[in-house]
Image: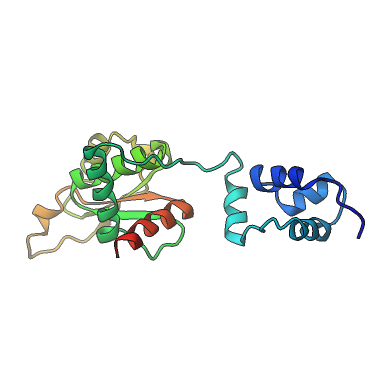
Amino acid sequence: MAGAPWTKTVLVEIYVRQKKSAHEIATTYSCSDHKVNFWLAKYHIQKRSISEAVYAKSNPNGDPFLFTPPHTKEESFLFGLGVGLYWGEGNKKNKNAIRLGNTDPYLQKRFLEFLVRFYNIPKWKFRFGLQIFSDMSPTEALQFWSRTLGIPKKQFMKVIVTPARSIGTYREKTKHGVLTICVCNKKLRDLLCGEIEKLQ
């Protein structure tokens, strides 16, 4: 096989740092994908997994968030609280998103603060699901959660209304409905699961 049209330093720059795919590099240098893969192996540059490649393609400007570790006692408390909430209340079966549903507005407000402060998630990237019972007002419930969390109503998905129960104390527990916070990001989900594994 003919020599590489690039040095190892250049290939590291465009494949590792710039996150260009093997196919994109091959197109740029008018060669085959096979040739790029050959020199990646020759230079001992580890290939990205399929999920890593998809993530890099979906985020061409780099990670959409940058982890900021806690520095104070108050921040450490919030970080521990956030991880604990996801451990106990989060939907960990979903491999591609962070989802946490709860009726407590202050709990949800703290979890939102946790993701914004430590993982630098812009608030506009969050999506919110709201489930209420048929004896509740969808408009009032939506206004309550939007005001409490400081989130515009356009970030809420369609309100789900289920039949009200005739017996029980559900009304006191869910007078504003069940709110689900959602962030679609596999890497963030894996990072939080990694924090949970450290505690097990």
Question: Residue 177, how many percent across, how many down?
Answer: 21, 51
Along the viewing direction, whichever of 189 and 105 lies nearer the viewer = 189
The reply to whether residue 2 is visible in this rendering is yes
Along the viewing direction, whichever of 96 and 198 lies nearer the viewer = 198
The reply to whether residue 142 is visible in this rendering is no
Q: Is residue 116 left or right of residue 22?
A: left
Q: Is residue 96 left or right of residue 99?
A: right
The quarter of the picture where residue 84 lies is bottom left
Q: Quadrant of the N terminus?
A: bottom right
Q: Residue at x 89, y 53 (%)?
A: 3
Question: Residue 181, how many percent across, how many down?
Answer: 33, 49
- Here the colouring is rainbow
Along the viewing direction, whichever of 34 and 76 lies nearer the viewer = 76
Q: Quadrant of the C terminus?
A: bottom left
Q: Residue at x 82, y 44 (%)?
A: 28
Q: Is residue 155 left or right of residue 170?
A: right
The quarter of the picture where residue 72 lies is top left
Does 78 sit above or below residue 103?
Answer: above
Does 59 sit above or below residue 172?
Answer: above
Q: Residue at x 42, y 55 (%)?
A: 189
Give the total of numbered labels.
0
Question: Residue 188, how many percent across, how many down?
Answer: 43, 51
Q: Is residue 62 left or right of residue 198?
A: right
Does 144 sit above or below residue 169?
Answer: above
Question: Residue 53, how many percent across, how many down?
Answer: 62, 55
Q: Residue at x 21, y 38 (%)?
A: 74
